[in-house]
Image (spheres, grey):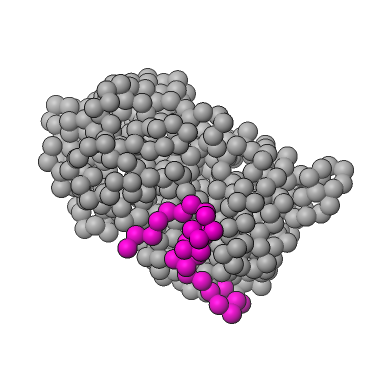
Amino acid sequence: MIGIVDYRAGNAPSVGYALERLGIEHRLVATGAELEGCDRLILPGVGAARATLDSLRASGLVEPLSERVHSDGIPFLGICIGLQVLFEHSEEGDVAALGWIPGTVRRFDDDLRVPQIGWNSVHLRRDHPVTAEFPDGGHAYFVNSYYASPADPGHVLGETEYGVEFCSIVAHANIVATQFHAEKSGELGLRILSGFAEWTP
Amino acid sequence: MLTKRLIACFDVVEGRVTKAQQFQDNIDVAPAEELAQQLYDDQIDEIVFYDITASAQKRKIDLETVRRVAHHVFVPFTVGGGIRTVDDMFEVLKAGAEKISVDSMAVRNPGIIRAGAEAFGRQCIVLSTQVKRVGVRPGIPSGYEVFIDGAREATGLDALDWVRRGEDLGAGEIVVNSIDCDGTAAGYDLEITRAVADAVNVPIIASGGAGTVDHIADGLTVGGAQAAIISSILYSPRLDRNVGVRELKDGLAARNVLMRPYLP
C-alpha cells in the first residue's frame, strides 16, 4: 500500500489518479497514524517550501514521516517541492528544511525566465531501479523557481539544464525524489511511478 | 533544454467543450472528458480548462467535470473560471488541477494573486488577460487595454501595466489572450505578445488566433512566448480542416521550434 501524503499545499489527488491508472494500490494519508499502514510513501508538492513545511509541521507529520523513512526504512518518493524539503536549507523563504539529504535549495538566476515551466530533458547519471524504464534524455514536466544542490554528488541520479546543470532526480538509500512532476510527465512519468512501486531498496 | 509547449484550451459549458469566436457564439464540440482523453493520447503538452459561465452565473466552478478530466490527463492541467478565494483554489487543486488561472476576478481583486501565490507558490497562479487593441491614448500607453467578463467590460487598465503588476503580485505565468484575434484562425497578435514577453520575466503564453503551424511557430519565436494555446486548429467545427497534435509538433520541429519529442 502506497501512502500519498495529503497536506494542504500538496496535489495528492493528481498523484492518486496516476497510481489509479497504473493499477497500483494507494491511499491518501493525512495523519501520523495513517502513515503506519503504508509500506511506501510519496510526498507530492506544488506549493512553496515554507508553506509546505508549515503545513507538514502543523499536521504533525514531520516526526512520523521521519520515523517511517529512517527507522523503518520504507521506500520514499518526493515530488517537486517534496524533493526540495528533503534538503537542509532552502533559499525560498530562507527556511530550515527536513535535512534528510545534505545540501541546499537555491533560486535560479534572475536573468532566466523564472519559474522554469515546461518539458525539459533528464540525463541519468547512473543506474537505479526507479529509473530503469526511463530513457536517458527523456522529457519530463518541470515547474520550479528553485533547484536542489546536493552536497554529495553521489546522491545525484538525474540532471537537467536550465541556465545551470541542476539535480532533477536525487537518490539516497531508500529515498528517491524528482524535481519534475512524475505524475504529470505523461507516459515517461508514469514509468517512474511504476518503478517506484516495484522498488526494493 | 527546456522545450516550447502546446496547450489545448477547453472552454467548458456544462461539462462540454465549446468553441467561441471573439468570445461569442459558442458552438458545441465534445464532452470535456472525452476530448481530454483523446488529446492526452495524442501527447498534448498541457491542458487548460475554463468554466466560462461560472463567473457570469455567479456560481462555483464545475468541480465534477474538473475531477473527471483530471482522471485522464497525466500532463499539467490548469483550471479557471469562478474562482474568488484561496479556498476555491484549494478545492480546484484537490480536484486534480496543478495550476489555477485567474482573469476577471484578479482585476476586481488583485490581492487574490498574492494570496494564491503565498498559499500554493507562484508557479501555481496563471494570470490570464483579455487584451484588445484600442490605440494609444491617455492611460493606455501601450495601445492595448485589458477587458474582463468575456471581453464585455473595458477596465481602463493598460495591458503592460497590468501584467507587470500581476507579476509583482505573484503570477507565475501570463496568458496574453487577444480579443481581436480569438477564434479567427488568422494568427496571434504578435505585437502585444512580444511586448508582454519583454515586459515581464515569467513565462508567457500566446492565445487567440492560431490557425496554422506557421501562426504557432510565429507566436513562439517572433512573439517570444514560451507556450501556445490552441483550440480552433485542433477541433473547431468552423474550420475546414483540423490538425492533430502530432502534425503540429512535426511542423514546429521542421521550423526549428524545440518541442517535446513524440514518444513512439
Relative to B240, say whether B218 is above or below.
above
The location of residue A99, given as percent across then percent down, is 29, 22
Residue at 59 percent across and 46 percent down: it is B204
Judge from the rendering whether residue B11 lies leftward or rightward of residue A17; answer left or right: right
Which stretch appears magenta?
B236-264
Tell me how many marks there are.
Answer: 0
Q: Quadrant of residue B52?
A: bottom right
Return the residue nearer the eye: B31 or A155: A155
Relative to B159, say whether B66 is above or below.
below
Verify whether residue A109 appears in magenta: no
Residue at 87 percent across and 43 percent down: it is B138
The location of residue A48, given as percent across then percent down, is 44, 33
Verify whether residue B248 appears in magenta: yes
Q: Does residue A82 appear anywhere in the picture?
A: no
Judge from the rendering whether residue A39 lies leftward or rightward of residue B233; answer left or right: left
Residue at 51 percent across and 28 percent down: it is A109
Residue at 25 percent across and 52 percent down: it is A191
Return the residue nearer the eye: B26 or B94: B26
Relative to A53, say whether B240 is above or below.
below
User: Main SS type for the magenta part?
Assistant: loop
Q: State which quarter of the image contains the C terminus of chain A.
A: top left
Relative to B28, say whether B102 is above or below.
above
The location of residue A43, given as percent across then percent down, is 30, 38
Return the residue nearer the eye: B235 or B49: B235
